[in-house]
Image (tube, rainbow, N blue to C red):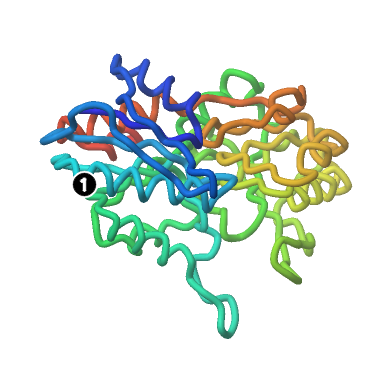
Amino acid sequence: MKLLAGNSNRTLAQAVASHLDLPLTRAQVKRFADNEVWVTIDENVRGEDVFVLQSTSYPANDHLMELLICIDALKRASARRITAVMPYFGYARQDRKTGGRTPISAKLVANLITRAGADRVLTMDLHSGQIQGFFDIPTDNLLAAPLIAGDIKDNYDRSSELLIVSPDVGGVVRALAVASRLNADLAIVDKRRPAPGKSEVANIIGDVQGRRLILYDDIVDSAGTLCNAAQSLIDAGAIEVSAYVIHGVLSGAAVDRVKNSVLKELVISDSIEASDEVSAEPKIRRVSCARLVAEAIRRIANEESVSKLFD
């Protein structure tokens, strides 16, 4: 087994390699003067089971091309099996036609990864589970619910006041997975989207009066939706609101929004490499998914069950 890392999240790759007690495969992933991606694998991979760890986070197109070219290089170097390990799968929010003459970009990216030569995909908390069906190769979607529930147990008093909140109707199943592990109640924010990237809180389903709330979602991008939801919950009588989000995209002025919001804290995983601004913000805390990803890689390499990780 070999583990190859692109440039998107070297910190996570090193942590995964450490858990596996495996050195990262020597490779060069660089740029030509015109910014074309150039890849060279500096050790023999013939007949090897190779895992390529690369989140397609910002800059999404550059990191996606790195992944595709790494896969192509391994395929041409006669690797036995190539697994694309994508802790964060970009373009996942474009998983259906939302109007006339719009793309389904998640399917396009799935096709690109498959045609590049990947034999299977390992990802974490896809924006929607049906994206697994966009791939014509085996796809494992890791669930961060056990990781998040464990961190909540360690850092929050699980009294009757604790309430898990889904920020929209589409995230109910995800939030319920955490709530059931904590034996906590569930509330839902009824959200409307007047335009892409914008949202309005229409209603709150559930009694949040006098409760300590934890918003749970898969992606935080501009943080506008998250902060608006938190403010609405405070206005509805909540004592405090924290947020757990798996993929901390945090683009634009997101960090400032979190800093100036009513959120007690925002907890994100390290599926995306944190910027200096994110690392410096005391209101944002990170939990590592390295052990979870490493164990899934080990199980795939040994032909063991991955789903048993979530029993």
Asked which quadrant contains residue 14, the reply is: top left
Under mark 1, the amino acid is Lys
The residue at the point 47 percent across, 41 percent down is 55
Asked which quadrant contains residue 277, the reply is: top right
Asked which quadrant contains residue 86, the reply is: top left
* Quadrant that contains the C terminus: top left
The residue at the point 33 percent across, 23 percent down is 24
The residue at the point 81 percent across, 43 percent down is 209
The residue nearer to you, when weighing 156 against 197, is 197
Find the residue positioned furthest to the bottom. Answer: 100
Q: Give the left or right position of residue 209, taking residue 172 as reference.
A: right
The residue at the point 13 percent across, 35 percent down is 46
The residue nearer to you, when weighing 247 against 47, is 47
Q: Position of residue 184 (x, y in %)?
A: 58, 36
Q: Looking at the image, is 127 positioned above or below residue 144?
A: below
* Mark 1 surroundings within 10 Å by alpha-carbon count, few (fewer than 14), some (14 through 19), many (20 or more): some
Q: Give the left or right position of residue 251, taking residue 28 as reference.
A: right
The residue nearer to you, when weighing 147 against 121, is 121
Q: Looking at the image, is 220 positioned above or below residue 12?
A: below
Figure label count: 1
* Quadrant that contains the N terminus: top left
Q: Position of residue 183 (x, y in %)?
A: 53, 34
Q: Position of residue 116 (x, y in %)?
A: 29, 55
Q: Position of residue 259 (x, y in %)?
A: 83, 33
Q: Secondary structure at mark 1?
A: helix
Query: According to the image, label 1 marks what residue?
Result: 75
The residue nearer to you, when weighing 168 against 79, is 79
Find the residue positioned furthest to the left. Answer: 47
